[in-house]
């Protein structure tokens, strides 16, 4: 058996989505196949414990976390005698690199209030509430690529499948705020419009209902696409039913769970200092009805920000420029649509424009094209896609997408272009969520401690 002696794991080893060599060797010695081993689930328990060990919520994870931490330590330190007691502080130091995650490093001392981050994506909700002084005590995200981005930035691995009761049971009691950007695809105007008839993502709202019914957070904060307000439920055969999906959601929250839920409101991110036209519906609720009527924030006081405020400075790599062939395809497509009286097709945004809604797939990127002459190599470079377009048209960079959603520049973008575009397109506009959460916490008389 190969001997290892590792003082601590690196951030990349903790959140990289893979078992490092000593753990692979340990699994082999225990006759545990790698295919059946759930590394992320164990790291979710460990990192949730380490982030909350100084608070009561840490007790939810402690019993399971300590044996797992010891297992990792012994696997990475094979010269440790079997009868040697491993001090907890030594194991904590072994995982200390998680404290180097850039977003967690900014907010690790927060403790004004607690919240859980469900359907967390890459942590847009989390950043918004941490900017108000909140401490996240539980996070859940199913997508493994988003899990890695979340972990590398926030210092914790989200739990995976929220439909599993074992994952629901780990949510601490007495949480102040429950956040959820529950999956929007089944409700989207651009999607199949099947609502709760969707056999996979549509029914996840009922798992959210079960969590609320079990934990009863003081405040619920939900976000979804605007199309949620108009879509109708469907029966098992897909036939349209009279009631709208939003009516079902409000009935559950108000009549079954007995929350005070004002009418949902559509908010546009451009009104909150975000350089993007992005309409999203917010659904909020209070466990105890406040003394005053709840009023959604309007964005008053925010100065407009435009694409020029967040665009890349200097020269952008040629890989972001479209090929001449593809660009001409877009030009012909838009001309054909205009001839038929439709407004579909690409759009170019200037420095004084708001960006269009970041979307996943389809024409999402083509709705936010940029005219950029800063790179002199566009017409000369050899590119595997062929000749680059002569009009200097490029797509957004990953960082521009991040800024268009209000992510700070210290947020690390880890994935390739396609995963990164998907992750930011599925995320929330952070300043909007922050303002809604601020208004909710104020009305509920829950302390906040705003930080930058």
Image (spheres, rainbow, N blue to C red):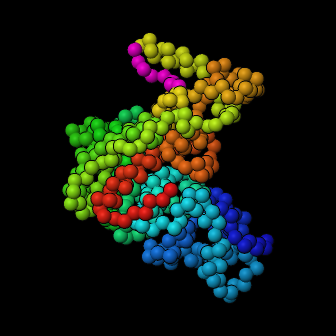
Foreground pick, 336 / 373: 373
Please say if 58 is above or below 408: below
Please say if 22 is above or below 124: below
Foreground pick, 301 / 299: 301
Foreground pick, 204 / 421: 421
- Looking at the image, can residue 443 be seen? yes
Instruction: Find out whether residue 65 is within the magenta segment.
Output: no
Please say if 299 is above or below 66: above
How many discs appear? 0
- Residue drawn at x 37%, y 55% as measured from the top left: 437
In the picture, measured across the screen, residue 410 lies left or right of residue 273, that is right
Q: The N terminus appears in which quarter of the rendering?
A: bottom right
In the picture, measured across the screen, residue 297 lies left or right of residue 431, that is left
Instruction: Find out whether residue 347 is within the magenta segment.
Output: yes
Whole-percent x and y of residue 150?
55, 55
Which stretch appears magenta? 341-348
- Residue drawn at x 33%, y 54% as measured from the top left: 439
Whole-percent x and y of residue 363?
50, 29
- Residue drawn at x 63%, y 20% as measured from the top left: 391
Whole-percent x and y of residue 369?
55, 28
Whole-percent x and y of residue 336?
48, 14
In the picture, measured across the screen, residue 16 lies left or right of residue 113, that is right
Please say if 304 is above or below 151: above
């Amino acid at each position: 058996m190969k001997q290892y002696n590792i003082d601590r794991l690196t951030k990349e080893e903790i959140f990289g989505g893979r078992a490092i060599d000593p753990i692979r060797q340990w699994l082999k010695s225990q006759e545990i196949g790698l295919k059946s081993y759930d590394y992320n689930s164990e790291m979710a328990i460990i990192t949730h414990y380490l982030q909350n060990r100084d608070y009561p919520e840490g007790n939810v994870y402690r019993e399971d976390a300590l044996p797992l931490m010891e297992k990792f330590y012994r696997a990475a330190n094979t010269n440790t005698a079997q009868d040697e007691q491993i001090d907890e502080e030594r194991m904590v130091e072994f995982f200390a690199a998680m404290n180097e995650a850039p977003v967690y490093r900014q907010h690790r001392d927060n403790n004004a209030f607690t919240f859980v981050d469900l359907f967390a994506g890459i942590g847009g909700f989390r950043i918004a509430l941490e900017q108000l002084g909140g401490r996240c005590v539980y996070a859940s995200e199913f997508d493994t690529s988003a899990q890695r981005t979340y972990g590398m930035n926030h210092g914790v691995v989200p739990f995976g499948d929220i439909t599993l009761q074992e994952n629901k049971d780990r949510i601490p009691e007495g949480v102040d705020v429950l956040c959820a950007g529950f999956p929007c695809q089944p409700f989207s105007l651009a999607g199949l419009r099947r609502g709760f008839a969707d056999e996979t993502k549509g029914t996840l709202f009922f798992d959210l209902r079960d969590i609320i019914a079990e934990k009863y957070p003081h405040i619920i904060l939900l976000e979804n696409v605007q199309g949620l307000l108009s879509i109708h439920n469907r029966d098992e055969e897909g036939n349209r039913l009279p009631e709208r999906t939003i009516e079902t959601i409000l009935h559950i929250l108000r009549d079954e769970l007995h929350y005070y839920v004002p009418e949902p409101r559509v908010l546009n991110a451009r009104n909150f200092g975000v350089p993007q036209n992005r309409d999203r519906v917010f659904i909020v609720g209070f466990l105890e009805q406040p003394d005053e009527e709840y009023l959604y924030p309007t964005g008053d006081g925010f100065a407009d920000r435009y694409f020029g405020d967040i665009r890349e400075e200097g020269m952008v790599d040629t890989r972001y420029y479209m090929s001449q062939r593809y660009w001409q395809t877009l030009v012909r497509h838009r001309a054909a649509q205009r001839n038929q009286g439709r407004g579909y097709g690409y759009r170019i945004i200037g420095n004084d424009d708001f960006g269009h809604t970041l979307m996943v797939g389809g024409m999402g990127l083509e709705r936010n094209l940029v005219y950029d002459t800063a790179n002199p190599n566009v017409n000369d470079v050899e590119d595997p896609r062929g000749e680059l377009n002569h009009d200097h048209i490029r797509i957004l960079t990953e960082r521009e997408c991040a800024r268009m959603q209000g992510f700070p520049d210290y947020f690390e973008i880890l994935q390739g272009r396609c995963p990164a575009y998907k992750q930011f397109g599925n995320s929330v506009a952070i300043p909007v969520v922050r303002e809604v959460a601020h208004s909710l916490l104020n009305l509920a008389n829950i302390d906040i401690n705003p930080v930058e």
